[in-house]
Image (tube, helix red, strand yellow):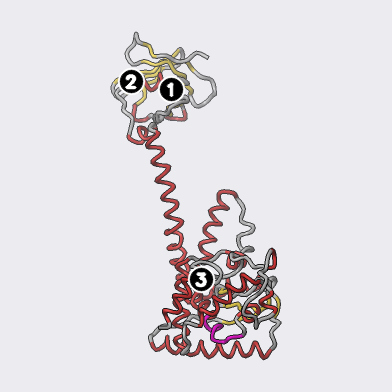
Amino acid sequence: MEHPTVDTAVTARLSARYFDGRSGRPHAVQVWIEGDVLCIQGEDVGLRLPVASVQWPERTRSGSRVARLPQGASLQSPDGDAWDAWRGDTGHRDGWVVLLQQSWRAVAASVLALTLLLAAGYVWGLPWLAREVALRVPDGVEDRVGEAVVAQLDDMVEPSRLSAAERATIETAWAGVLAAHQKAQAAQGVAVRPSRLLIRDSDIGPNALALPGGTILLTDDMVRLVQHDQQVLAGVLGHELGHVQHRHGMRMLVEVGVMGAVTSLLWGDYSGLLAAVPLWLGQAHYSRKAEHEADAYSVVVLRSAGISPAVMARMFERLALFRRCGDKLLEDVTAASCDTPATGEAAREEDGWGLGFASHPADEDRIAFFRNAAR
């Protein structure tokens, strides 16, 4: 293939190929610019076009050049260097965008800036968006989401194995604490979001989950772990009520939903988005800020009922013992220690199901927080 060359005998002329936009046959032509007019001359081509009507290609490091002409026609030059030299002879100067594209330092800086922007969006922008969206989700919509999540969880949990009397004791004690809290908040003009307590048996271990719509799930194992201590359970449920009050569950769904939607746009799979909601709620720990907010709310709930926030230290101590002893501690709830630490599957992993009781912040920090709140 013959490469176009600059014709030094004729000022600012270039050999190129012309396509008329109606057929694929190229025409060998000479092109030059006279003032504001682009001249195209070949064996069977003679055109004079306003320069302003031409869409000029940006200069790149390699590759051919293609100028778009009116009515679908085009000029092409496989020799990019010759084209760029010719354009330079006509007085053309590259814009700042092209100059930046030609600089590896500018490209590297742009990539770094984009990476930082995406990271900032994930760390700060996404939580802010989730909070703002969650706060504006109508209660009816959140209730329907909560009902769907509860329906899915029903396939993962079993009816409580606690006796009817044990469940009634827990429900009655919590109702009293909740009533005292609602009364104290009402005196300050603050409404407590509606909630309901479900006690279920499950293999997710000692835990409590706050779901969108206000449902709080308490596992039998959590009741056994704290040895049916109603004050400790009030702190646990107060923590979950804090998640409900701040709509953390809905915010998490928005965050994961946005990330899932972005992932689906990139990889084209929406199928598992809603089906994985219970798993998200169970395995994706709340942020450190959300856990602090829920802990602080638990303190308010406990104080409303005249209970010392220091009772929560006992819950974390029992959790630490559970991580050491595993299910053996649940089989003997009166045990204060274990001689042989659990290993393998018998020991619960710290990062399993749960809304923060076995996750960050560190247990020591949270114990100190509740003890300080009791002073």
Which residue lies under the disc numbered 3?
363
Residue beneath the point at 43% across and 42% down: 111
Q: Quadrant of residue 339 in the image?
A: bottom right
Q: Quadrant of residue 350 in the image?
A: bottom right
Residue 99 versus residue 18: which sits nearer the camera? 99
Q: Residue 123 carries which label?
A: none
Look at the numbered discs 1 and 3 and tell me whether their residues touch, using CB distance below 8 Å.
no
Residue beneath the point at 63% across and 59% down: 272
Residue range in magenta is: 228-235
User: Relative to residue 285, is residue 37 depicted above or below?
Assistant: above
For the residue labelled by badge 2, is the local secondary structure a helix, a strand or a loop? strand
Say whether disc 2 or disc 1 marks the residue closer to the N-terminus. 2
Which residue lies under the disc numbered 2?
33
Relative horizontal placement of residue 323, taking residue 310 as reference (left or right): right
Say whether disc 1 or disc 3 marks the residue closer to the N-terminus. 1
Circle 3: residue type: Asp
Q: Quadrant of residue 275 in the image?
A: bottom right
Q: Residue 71 at what x, y percent from top left?
A: 45, 30
Q: Residue 227 at what x, y percent from top left?
A: 62, 83
Q: Work out which quarter of the rendered image holds the C terminus and state it.
A: bottom left
